[in-house]
Amino acid sequence: MPSTKVDALIIGAGPAGLMCAYNLSQAGLHIRIVDKKAERLQKGQADVLHVRGLEIIDSLGLSSQILKDAQRSVHTATYASSPSVNGEISLVSRKSTVQGVESYMPFMGLYAQSSVEGILREALASGEKYIPSATFAPQFQSLSPAHKVEVEQGVSPVEMKVADNHQDYPVTIRLQHPSGQTETVRAKYVIGCDGAHSWTRSQLGIEMVGETSDQVWGLVDAYVDTDFPDIRVLTAFENNGRRAMLIPRENDMVRFTIQISESDVSVDSQTGRVDRTKVGVDRIMELVKELIRPYRIEFRRVDWSGVYVVGQRLASKYQDENGRVYIVGDACHTHSPHAGQGMNAAISDAHNLSWKLVHVLKAWGTPDLLRTYESERRGFASQLIEFHVRLAEVMSGQVKGTSTE
């Protein structure tokens, strides 16, 4: 294939990559977005949009479907057992979901990541203008028409070279298509949104600092029948040392995230990877039934399930030395999903970087502006990881406290 030139090549089509692509395409810039997966995400993954994430999506003109369909959470409940009640839980407390935050959307939106991605993909493919010029442009500056952009599925980067900044297109990427054919793309900027095992980050030699814990958790998304009174409330559980979270979802679905004991799984001490064959969805559902006694729950239909090990890691830096290649979202920070911050942090990272790239590529700002991306977002990620370490310890019973605190 012949080589092509783009303002930006985005690697990875999760929330971070799609947000970058959307913002840049709305500014009329020439971009491409590739994803190594053969198909887009259909279900599972993240499920919470916090206030700031909702505000960003709303500012981009894309919130209407989410606000219509999402389960809105305005308070949380905590249920726990006591030694005197033989493993049966009871209500301990209720608290406001959003405290001390001023917003015109003072709630959490419980909504599937796959649906958020679908909204962004549809907006990208439409080529329609959603963002007013004033959102990005200085006064009296106008933006070019938006471009139609489709995610190129099954396309993987295999080689990257970065030349000095004297060239107009200093980054050269070789892409491999599903057919095995390769293509060379020359880009002004490359944005790596390719997840916790980021190819982009590895090419830059950037280290992830932190360790994987031995806390193992199971997830199940399902439609249920139950007499539990707070089934549509964001709820934290503790029953004889086992912790769990209930997240009510759109269309009457629920998600349970529950602590898995060492007897149920084996974890490779070198890689931290879980042997997922040792615990399946039947075991996860059995644990949930035990957890919420004396209440009854029956799983009518399971939509998705999974098992994960909690890990807390932070990239040593967010860009290459020339300021032409950047990493975003899980590519630069990973943390437990207990507080539902992963998708929100990715969206905020992408929004922060992409509006600055618009200004630099439109010559409304100097390249020095891009340095503020790392200084602003890495500091936030560091604080977020500290919070998640504390939360993971609380939920696993290593320290006293409740997960709603």
Image (spheres, grey):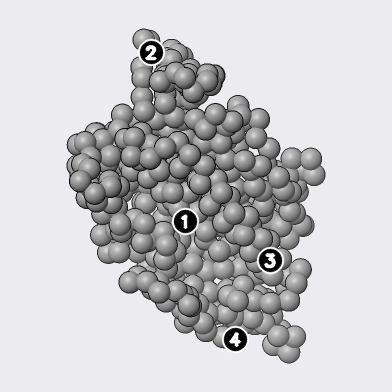
Position of residue 217 in the picture relative to residue 374 (left or right) = right
Determine the image quadrant of residue 262. Answer: bottom right
Q: Which mark is residue 92?
A: 4
Q: Label 1 to label 2, Cα distance in Å?
A: 35 Å
Q: Earlier in the sequence, mark 4 or mark 3?
A: 4
- Amino acid type indicated by mark 3: Arg
Q: Are marks 4 and 1 in contact (CB under 8 Å)?
A: no
| Camera-side mark, 4 or 2 | 2
Q: Nearer the viewer, residue 207 or 227?
A: 207
Position of residue 312 in the picture relative to residue 167 (left or right) = right
Q: Which residue is mark 3?
A: 390
Q: Label 4 to label 3, Cα distance in Å?
A: 21 Å
Q: Residues within 10 Å of mark 1 (few under 14, many from 20)?
A: many
Locate the N terminus by quadrant.
top left
Q: Are marks 3 and 2 in contact (CB under 8 Å)?
A: no
Q: Which residue is mark 2?
A: 3
Q: Earlier in the sequence, mark 1 or mark 2?
A: 2
| Camera-side mark, 3 or 2 | 2
User: Considering the numbered disc 2 on the image, is that residue within a helix, a strand or a loop?
Assistant: loop
- Amino acid type indicated by mark 1: Asn
Q: Label 4 to label 1, Cα distance in Å?
A: 29 Å
Q: Which residue is mark 1?
A: 344
Position of residue 30 in the picture relative to residue 14 (left or right) = left
